[in-house]
Image: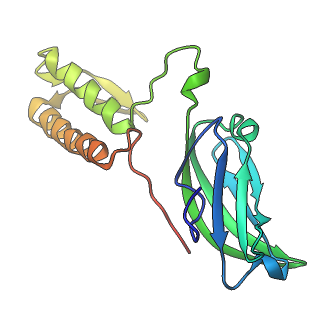
Amino acid sequence: MADENSCIPAEITAGDTATWRRTLALYPASAGWVLAYKLVSRTAAFTVTATATADGDSFVATVPATDTATWAAGQYQVQEYVTLGTERHTIGVTALRVLPDLAVATTGMDNRSHAQKVLDSLEAWLESKAPVAGAMEINGRKISWYPLADLLKLRDRYRAEVAAEQRSGRPFGARILVQL
């Protein structure tokens, strides 16, 4: 369980039970406030409602494993809000990353971050010993070559980004938290 005054965890693994405690001095559970979370991704939306704990002032949110098992891996925006009758107050908005449940995987998956994928592609191109990148077209704009010096700069940039991800201990890239 997360710390006493914490928000929803930054990461939840699909298929795991998720539980956290939340204390809001201005909106105590003992006064009848209901705490809820709305999770929204590009393709899905879920609501999580917290219940009052034994002390009466805190909330505990529990999402059963059967519910998180239906959550697709990816990035979600989370709105935390309280309600009491017709009143509603947004507490904050944050980000949540749902990690895949590897225990139910039946095929391989590419869970590299964007930076790692680009770095791998750049290094594969450089190892082909081609002096420039080939021709391509993007939105009607043709690019016929990409100088080796520019490819090396891009490689170095993405190496630094991947190294930063690895130092952070987050194999899927960095996360951004926003609280209003």
**Quadrant assignment for the C terminus:** bottom right
Residue 128, image x, y percentages? 16, 14
Check the image and report above or below for 164 versus 50.
Answer: above
Please, which residue is most extreme toward the right here? 85
Query: Which of the pair 33/143 is nearer the observer?
Result: 33
Check the image and report above or below for 64 versus 32.
Answer: above
Residue 123, image x, y percentages? 20, 25
On screen, residue 140 versus residue 47, left or right, reads: left
Q: In percent of the image, x 65 and y 53: which residue is there?
A: 19
On screen, residue 47 versus residue 149, left or right, reads: right
**Quadrant assignment for the N terminus:** bottom right
Query: Which of the pair 49/62 is nearer the observer?
Result: 62
- Please, which colouring scheme is shown? rainbow
Residue 154, image x, y percentages? 20, 39
On screen, residue 132 versus residue 88, left or right, reads: left
Check the image and report above or below for 94 versus 98.
Answer: below
Which of the 4 quarters of the picture holds residue 155? top left
Which of the 4 quarters of the picture holds residue 91? bottom right
Q: In percent of the image, x 29 and y 42: which residue is there?
A: 166
Q: In percent of the image, x 56 and y 33: which residue is there?
A: 100
Please, which residue is most extreme toward the front here? 54
On screen, residue 55 versus residue 18, left or right, reads: right
The number of discs equals 0
